[in-house]
Image: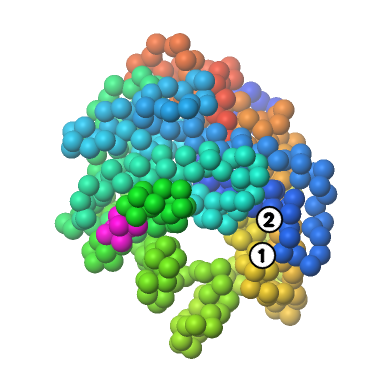
Amino acid sequence: MEAGVAEQKKSKGWCWYLIVFVIGALVVAAATLTVSKNFRHSAKPTSIPGAIVEKYADTLEIILQFFDVQKSGKLVNNRIAWRGDSGLRDGNEENLNLSKGMYDAGDLIKFGFPMAFMATVLSWAILEYGDHINAEKQLEHAQDSLKWITDYLINAHPAANVLYVQVGDPQVDHNCWERPEAMTEKRPLVQVNMSFPGAEVAAETAAAMASASMIFKIIDFTNSSMLLMHAQQLFILANTYRGSYSVSIPQLQKYCNSTGYGDELLWAATWLYHATEKQFSLKYVLLSRINFFGAKDESTSENLDLQLYRESSEAIMCALVPYSPTATSSRTESGLIWVSEWNSLQHPVASAFLTVLYSDYMLTSQTETLYCNGKSYKPEDLHKFAISQAYYVLGNNPMKMSYLIGYGSSYPQYAHHRGSSIPVDAKTGCRDGFKWLNSSRPNPNVAVGALVGRALPQ
């Protein structure tokens, strides 16, 4: 794989695809890079040199700008010079204001499912590492981006049993190449409800709102209360009408498919458990910073259930740590986790996120050792693995190229992104904009903070 990537660097005719999982990169930057400055839970100092940490300190600001790149609606305090207002009429056909939210990757569709997950993980990053994000003077930007998404999600839930999960027609969108500010095509809405259930997207949206309610509880109590109310209503909808939206709305399978809703129900219930301060039933809980490692105030049966989850999570950690007896062989020669060619960076980024969280959870619960088939590992070992994945993405790879657009002196110039590829002053319609996609020239606008998924020949 890595030899192939090296060949790709020689050609300017490569088209770089983005992944939606950019929030994983945010968490990696917040958790593995800035936390390294103050790995205060550990009995031993981190082995990562301070100078290297400082070198990557600006990644958080770069990554957060991708939210601004992706925004729909009437922009406020716009930090991206080549972006303007767009999607202002989204939702009008149903008398809704769905102008906010964010476009999906390099397209102009708003998919509620990945957008909600993005909001949930962003909330998680802020909850766990908000002090580090604040130290980098980026906390307000993170909170503003989160609210931009949740404002959209609130408006997309106009009634207890109705949730709008998509704005725009993917087929029409894929047949057009234009800037979001210039689009004129109709943008139909898709909803899930009691007759056409979508348990996974309703539950994911409930998770997003519940987790965000915890962020805004102190700084905006009214908004926090509203988010929690919507989260509870959506969980009831998801749990009562257990049908997959990929079945209810089969046309979505090609673009935003789902394989089931069980994990989203657990995920949503976990966040509701925390957001309601344990008033929500523990039987749904999947992960908890303290309870995950045993809770003194819970029953024996509930602690046994949590222990099963812990064992599964330990198996995942043991698979990720290099040289563990059960370590996965799905890695490149340079140590990058490699699961599939499509959107290949989402797996190492997600793995880094989970391992740094798990290592911090071990420290918080005073769990000193992770055992993997007789071999023991410390939190520092997990943290070191997470750092290695982040550094690979940021340029410590065979190509010596940053896969984070806008970071460093060498990064991809041909992102598969409509707004990035078309000059601001270009006059294009639906079809004639493809000349910019197929241009041999680098993109005129930098999609700052975008994380590359893979490279393909044009």
Horizontal and vertical percent position of residue 165 = 30, 46
With respect to residue 379, does 412 lie above or below? above
Which mark is drawn over residue 137?
none
Whether residue 204 is visible to the viewer of this picture, yes or no, is no
Whether residue 97 is visible to the viewer of this picture, yes or no, is yes
Q: What span is colored magenta in the figure?
A: 228-234
Q: Nearer the viewer, mark 2 or mark 1?
A: 1
Instruction: Give the main secondary structure, helix, strand or loop, of the magenta stretch.
Output: helix
Q: Is residue 245 left or right of residue 105?
A: left
Which mark is drawn over residue 386?
2
Q: Nearer the viewer, residue 88 or 17?
A: 88
Horizontal and vertical percent position of residue 437 = 48, 22
**Distance between the Cα atoms at labels 2 and 1?**
10 Å
Amino acid residing under circle 2: Ala
The residue that appears at 75% across and 50% down in the rendered structure is: 37
Q: Mark 1 and mark 2 in contact (Cβ < 8 Å)?
A: yes
Q: Is 233 in the magenta?
A: yes
Q: Nearer the viewer, residue 184 or 150?
A: 150
The residue that appears at 47% across and 83% down in the rendered structure is: 298
The residue that appears at 36% across and 30% down in the rendered structure is: 73
Label whose residue precedes the other's in the sequence (2 or 1): 1
Q: Residues within 10 Å of mark 1 (few under 14, many from 20)?
A: many
Classify residue 71 by image quadrant.
top left
SS for dot 2: helix
With respect to residue 440, does 193 lie above or below? below
The residue that appears at 42% across and 43% down in the rendered structure is: 147
Horizontal and vertical percent position of residue 288 = 52, 69
Quadrant in the picture for the N terminus: top right
Give the residue at mark 1: 359
SS for dot 1: helix
